[in-house]
Structure formats: structure tokens, C-alpha cells
């Protein structure tokens, strides 16, 4: 498995693609369950989340029953992508507020 900045940007690119395709939500999730890997595929990288790995589980997109499971680093890449997307869509007054604290 890849590690380091290249792997991170590859995961971010994949997260962006899946969000654009509607496979992943583009919103931050307030309810997250963490646990040991269940052996199922990761929603981002599609690799199995092994029992020795940490598994992060969130509710899937509305209308779908299944939850989404991620490796820790995949979960982080997806949520970072969500933050970036949502920052881009903030209105100008909110951005001004965020930039006021210099
Ligand atoms: Zn993964």
C-alpha cells in the first residue's frame, strides 16, 4: 500500500471523483463509529479493512440503507475533500468572517 503525500493526494483525487459521481456524500458526518476492521471493502479505496486496521463507519447517503466503511486514512482524505468542497461553496460573507481572524 502507498504511504506519504502521493498516496494522500491519490486518495483525495479518488474521494473527489466519488463525490462527483454521487457515490460518497459531500457533507461532514456528525455520527461516526470507530472499531476494528470487519474485513469488508473500504468505500474509498475498495481494499479490505482488515481486523488489525481501524474501521470508520458512517451512515450512507440518504435513501440508501447501507453504511459506509473506511480505513482511517481514507476517512480522513474523504472528510478533507468535503471540507474543501464546502469551503468553496460558502457565501462571501461567511468567507469574510472566516478570514477576519488574522
Ligand atoms: Zn481505504
Image (cartoon, rainbow, N blue to C red):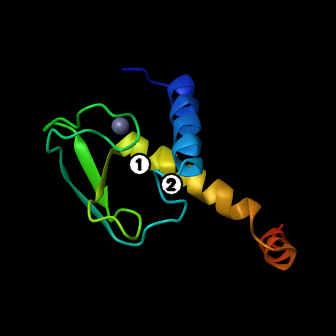
Q: Which residue is rendered at x = 36% and y = 20% of the image?
A: 1
Q: Are marks 1 and 2 in contact (CB under 8 Å)?
A: yes
On residue 59, the disc is none
| Residue at the image point whose x is 66% and y is 63% from the top | 86
- Secondary structure at badge 2 equals helix
Q: Which residue is mark 1?
A: 75
Q: Residue at x 46, y 50 (%)?
A: 23
Q: Position of residue 44 (x, y in %)?
A: 41, 41
55 displayed left or right of 30: left
Relative vertical location of residue 72 with respect to residue 31 in this rendering, above or below = above
Given the current orientation, which residue lies at the most extreme front position? 63
Residue 13 placement (x, y as % from top left): 59, 36
Q: Work out whether residue 64 or residue 83 is closer to the camera in this orientation and state it.
A: 64
Q: Quadrant of residue 101?
A: bottom right
Query: Tag 2: Cα neighbours inside 10 Å, few (<14), some, or many (≥20)?
Result: some
Label 1 residue SS: helix
Quadrant of res 29: bottom left
Q: Which label sits on residue 79?
A: 2
Coordinates of residue 24 in the picture (x, y in percent): 46, 53
100 versus 85 height, above or below: below
Most extreme residue toward the top is 1
Residue located 35% across and 44% down the image: 43
Which image quadrant is residue 89 in?
Answer: bottom right
Amino acid at each position: 500500500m502507498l504511504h506519504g503525500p502521493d498516496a494522500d493526494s491519490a486518495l483525495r483525487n479518488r474521494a473527489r471523483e466519488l463525490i462527483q459521481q454521487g457515490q460518497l456524500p459531500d457533507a461532514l458526518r456528525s455520527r461516526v463509529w470507530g472499531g476494528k476492521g470487519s474485513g469488508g471493502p473500504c468505500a474509498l479505496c475498495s481494499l479490505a479493512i482488515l481486523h488489525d486496521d481501524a474501521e470508520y463507519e458512517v451512515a450512507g447517503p440518504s435513501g440508501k440503507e447501507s453504511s459506509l466503511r473506511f480505513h482511517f486514512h481514507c476517512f480522513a482524505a474523504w472528510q478533507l475533500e468535503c471540507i474543501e468542497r464546502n469551503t468553496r461553496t460558502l457565501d462571501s460573507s461567511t468567507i469574510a468572517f472566516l478570514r477576519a481572524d488574522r
